[in-house]
Image (spheres, coloured by chain):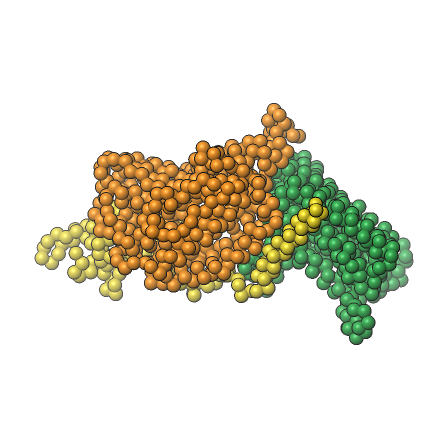
Amino acid sequence: MFLVDYLKDITGAIKSLLTGMRRTGYYFTHHKEIITQQYPDNRDTLKLPERFRGEVVMSHNESNEHRCTGCTACELACPNGTIKVVTKFDISPEGKKKKAVDKFIYHLELCTMCNLCIEACPTDAIRMAQSFEHSVYDRAELTKVLNKPGSKIEEGVE
Amino acid sequence: MIEELGTTEQGELVINIGPQHPATHGVLHLVVTLNGETIRKVEPHLGYIHRSIEKMCESLSYRQFIYTTSRMDYLSSHINNHACALCVENGIQVEIPERAQVIRVLMDELTRIASHLLWWGAMAMDVGAITPFFYAFREREMINDIMEETCGARLTMNYMVPGGVMMDIHPNFQRRVKELLLQFKHKLPEYHELVTDNVIFQSRTKGVGYLSADDAVSYGTSGPTARGSGVPCDIRKLYPYDVYSKLEFSECLAKEGDTFARYLVRMNELEQSIRIVEQLIDNIPEGDFQAKTKAVLKLPKGEFYQRVETARGEFGVYMISEGAMQPYRIKFRSPGFSNLSALDHMARGAKIGDLVAIMGSLDLVIPDIDR
Amino acid sequence: MWSLSKISGLIDHWLNGKLGSGWASVAEMVIVGLCVIGLFAILGLVLVLMERKVSAWMQIRLGPNRVGPKGLLQSLADTLKLLVKEGLTPDGADKFLFNLAPFVAMIAAMLLMAPIAFAKDFQIWDVNIGVLYITAISSISVIGILMAGWSSNNKYSLLGAMRSGAQIVSYELSAGLSILSIVVLTGSLKVSDIIAAQQNGWWIFKGHVPALIAFVIFIIAATAETNRAPFDLAEAESELTAGFHTEYSGMKFALFFLAEYVNVFIVCAIGATLFLGGWMPFHIGSWEGFNHIMDYIPSSIWFFGKTFFLIFLIMWFRWTFPRLRIDQLLNLEWKYLLPIGMVNIILVTIVAIKGWHF
């Protein structure tokens, strides 16, 4: 009886090992199962979903106008102090002083892509871009000014 | 030369496994006392990735602090976020729309599947089989893609906010989850062929790292670690939150208390999670994905506690509010810390190879332990 | 038709004519030495690339595909990188032994090349105790590993080396027993005799079940002796980071690496010689036409084909199975392989005495 168990042990063990080998052997011979994406080569076809959070950008239209009113809601919503909104006072044609954004400073190196600033923005001025290759040689390059030079606020955005 | 190598008085060898070591999955430092190959004592040293998240949370508002919890147990970030969101919702007394609840539970279970998949691959790698890791990542990648599409990130989603979820699900979400389920049904038998049934794996894990039910309770272990010893402790069953009370799923238990039992519990949990996703994916109710909440949240004075079941065990958020915009004090109860405390007890008398297998079966995530 | 033995014969003839027999044999030794070193380098490059490709395809990856056409030059690039790396010697190490160890491992592997018949009549040294020579020399490789582990002054290395010692010493037994079964069947220790005995069929087919069992045991023991997964306890990376060669870097590490692969090649070559007929083509009984076609394939291709098939088998093991624990490893040897091997050798003897083999 001992011998029967002993032999049963061995055949069971060999069977289980062969099952595993059949599985890896299957993948060895079926190259269509390969799932590798050759990343830097497939840049042209690599499309990230539109919700992917790569970095914060400010949308500008063709006439170099953005929608940021300089309300600093994003600055308050940010948990890391990533955003610093520097405001100035524009003089409107009627002669009234109006708060506007002078510099929208964004520290990419501090950003955790939590999306809270975009949620907080009342005018949809900022959004998340899908770019993700952020590495640079100088850390200073990661501090960005999001409103383009000479841009102004779009008509009708309060 | 042995003396020079650093031994104890009894001629035992003291070796440092970690903080940089292929088996510790991060920066865990184990000071192991060995007698030959046999382990006499294991002393975990913590703190290599301590970022004082609890203290940081005290200076963040109730909306802001949630993102930090994604960085604790990064493999179940949704579930951590869920706990924090629930805790804040307790405080502000807001009713969560049915749709948001269902989406949350769906995300939780997908996260659990992804986490268990990574654990399965890492566990197999710990005992020496490298190939399963890649098979596990194939399915995990599908989940990550789903997360990326709906939540905007692959690992640290910050998708759960007080009042519901941040965004509605993506139009493709249901289709892709169904694809995943199909793929998973097809591939799960492979996992068992390759690892579970393998005679070497079984002999490496059966009877190794025994933890009795009493010890499991006294060390405060939770999740699959405790359930592997036969202690029912699934928070989803005991203290159901969101829509878990309406769902049909069973709590996976095993009596043996060894490494293989913990392994089986996790493998069964994978199937149960799939069952939950299957029940919900076609029944996402219409409605809002977020309840209306005030722009600035303020919790009433008092203490709040919320526990959830992460992939590793019981995760708790304890919050003291003084009525301000920020919490006065936050304490997280992380499952990994208590599970790790049982390691010494389990590993004594085992071999070095066993230590690695036991650690694999605990599924430690070091940032979760250190916080 | 050209063959390796013809080429070697021509060179021998030419050298004898030019230099006289004394100097000719010296020149031949030098040539043989250079050839062995060259074969080593080529084997290292080919086997590393093969391992990486095999593992990649089993793991649903692409594998190296950047350096050279289809990644063929990858291992050359790796070698270049290892050559220019600093060969570090730890402060507390026993410097002499530390630096000697990789060469011991290497030389042990090199010595084993001698009795292997690479093609018909193409053998470095057809010694009449060839099989004994192989079993004796293959035990030396453990000394290199023990030396490396001891002299590194590193606890991981020491543990790895001790594991390796226990492992190789015990698996030597069952490897020896399974080799012995073929010796019993052939009645000779000479490698060329063993191959010649397989003229009308390889031992794995001729020797019935006992030969098959001996073959399986040999493959398991060979995997263990070369410290390959699932028996790679000496370097188990999830337990001992890199085991006995934790402290080695640069070219000294590369020598260990190379020695491992060359050892794999050699044990597979021995397996092919003993069980699969070495360079003998595949013949089926009385199928004259078929046998004739098989004879047209050069003998060196037969030899390397069989050897690489066995190497692939060992790689297949490595990328499928988890690693054993040290006590289980010894259990497997002493409780399973050795008793089975002993019973098996009795069966083989009966088969040989009764002349039941074909």
Q: Residue furthest bottom?
A: C289
Q: Residue furthest top?
A: B9
> Relative to residue B217, is residue C31 drawn left or right?
right
Instruction: Residue C182: tell me if it is visible.
Output: yes
Q: Could you tell me which quadrant the C terminus of chain B lies in?
A: top left
> Relative to residue C108, is residue A50 drawn left or right?
left
Which hue belongs to chain A?
Answer: yellow
Q: Could you tell me which quadrant the N terminus of chain B lies in?
A: top right
Q: Quadrant of residue B66?
A: top left
* Front residue (pair B199, C317): B199
Residue A147, percent across and down? 26, 55
Compared with C272, C142 (above or below) is: above
Residue B304, percent across and down? 29, 38
Compared with B296, C43 (above or below) is: below
Q: Residue furthest front?
A: A1
Q: Kindly identify the residue that appears in the image at 80 percent across and 73 percent down.
A: C287
* Front residue (pair C97, C63): C63
> Relative to residue C19, is residue B93 drawn left or right?
left
Q: Note the chain letter of the orange one.
A: B
Q: Kindly identify the residue that appears in the image at 40 percent across and 39 percent down.
A: B334
Instruction: Residue B154: tell me if it is visible.
Output: no
Q: Kindly identify the residue that appears in the image at 46 percent across and 53 percent down.
A: B271
Residue C128, percent across and down? 87, 52
* Front residue (pair B227, C95): B227
> Relative to residue A106, is residue C315 drawn left or right?
right
Q: Note the chain letter of the green one.
A: C
Q: Kindly identify the residue that appears in the image at 53 percent across and 54 percent down.
A: B191
Residue B111, percent across and down? 41, 51
Total residue callouts: 0
